[in-house]
Image (spheres, rainbow, N blue to C red):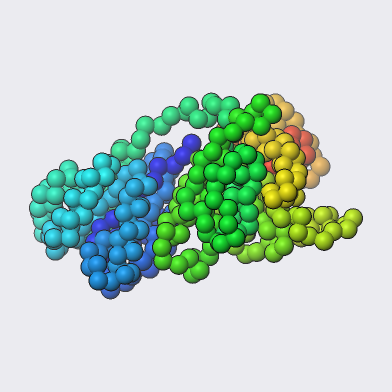
Amino acid sequence: MAKPIVAIVGRPNVGKSTLFNRIAGGRQAIVESEPGVTRDRLYADCHWLTRSFILIDTGGFDFDDSCNIATEVRRQAEIAVSEADVIIFVVDARMGITADDEHIAHLLRKASKPIIVAANKVDHADIETGIYEFYRLGLGDPIGVAAEHNRNIGDLLDAVVGRFPKTSHADEDSDVIRMAVIGRPNVGKSSLVNALTGTERSIVTNIPGTTRDAVDTAFTWNEQDYIIADTAGMRRRKRVEWGVERYSVIRALRAVDRADVALGVIDAVEGVTEQDKKIIGYSHEQGKALVIVVNKWDAIEKDSATMRLFEQEIRKELSYVSYAPIVFVSALMGQRLERLMETVTSVASQHTMRVSTGRLNEVLQEAVRLNQPPSDKGKSLRIFYINQLDVKPPVLGLFVNDPGLLHFSYRRYLENQLRAAFGFHGTPIWFKVRRRE
């Protein structure tokens, strides 16, 4: 299920980044007193109550068109608004309404999105009466907060979550397999989409960054329906230049969020790069099924050992996704596409697989018998039982006497035993470790 997107907007220096950091739980945005420090949007996975969402920090709406950067930052914020499900409009309670606040409010009303006015810098009761001035913006009840001091942030988040779109399970029950093609610019993502769908819907050039949006294309392969999203290439932040490429990243991440299976495309000529690791890592963190696609395999001089050695190198560099199958293809030549689609279908099935509690506990008991749980200072880990809590990805509840005794190496051992017994090929496994005396 796709996570709602919440955008924080406002004019410069009203405390947007401070609020972002407060909600996200860390200093992820640069916070300075100088207006305009935040020039790019930052994104964070956040949780409140039972809901998860993606939070976007934006640069300030600056209406000084004489400054190219200000114009571009404003454009970025406008794009964030267009992507958002809920908008937090931050104003300065100490300063009151400004002309720019009124201009922003006018733009937000035209967006027809749920909007919450957060009157920031309400550090004490004397300032709180000033928030009523913001009713004049015509955007509903303002909420007085102090992001720096964590004042009323819970009330603000209650209001945000209350305005999320109603959840629907229609997509989860669908037989359609959703894929997101992710990777650095110019690794052949659009060529791969075109080869699979038999269309030229995605523009293919040798210029990095041609694809700006996540474009969904429906197609059928061997009587199975798929939706594939071609996404813009994700570069390192410092290499992303001002312009439309910046806002493409959130759409790529959103495509991953909506997907069942991520296709992490690697350039066979260049091999695995640090950016490949970060991009594929996002899919892993989101619990998506994953297929590593090595494209441009036709451009490699090969002998009988080339593929095996290349796969060993990938496993070494991407050890945290050892569960992911590797498929070598040439989108340009149409090579091994049948193998790729068979693999996608297989990992999508593993991603939704359920295993009975009885069978899980049979494997768990045998694993514990073969390799006793660790102990610390005379106290041994006791594992009582295991059950499956969810799918996409498979979530397993593990009930123990002391979660602190479950070392990551033993957790990995249990995961390997479960994979050996049941497969879970191509999907991460999430453990929820719970205490039971």
- Image quadrant assignment for residue 56: bottom left
Quadrant hosting residue 271 = bottom right
Q: Position of residue 121 (x, y in %)?
A: 21, 61
Instruction: Identify the residue at image location x=61%, y=44%.
Output: 194
- Which residue is more in the foreground, 9 or 24? 9
Which corner quadrant holds the C terminus? top right
Q: How many marks?
A: 0
Where's residue 321, x and y in %? 67, 51
**Can see residue 250?**
yes
Please give the name of the residue rendered at 33% of the width and 63% of the height, measured from the top-left corner.
73
Q: Is residue 118 left or right of residue 168?
A: left
Query: Residue shown at 22%/64% (left/top)?
Result: 63
Give residue 407's position: percent from left, percent from top.
66, 52
Which sits in the foreground, 212 or 33? 212
Q: Is residue 365 above or below residue 193?
A: above
Question: Which residue is depicted at the point 81% across and 42% down?
Answer: 370
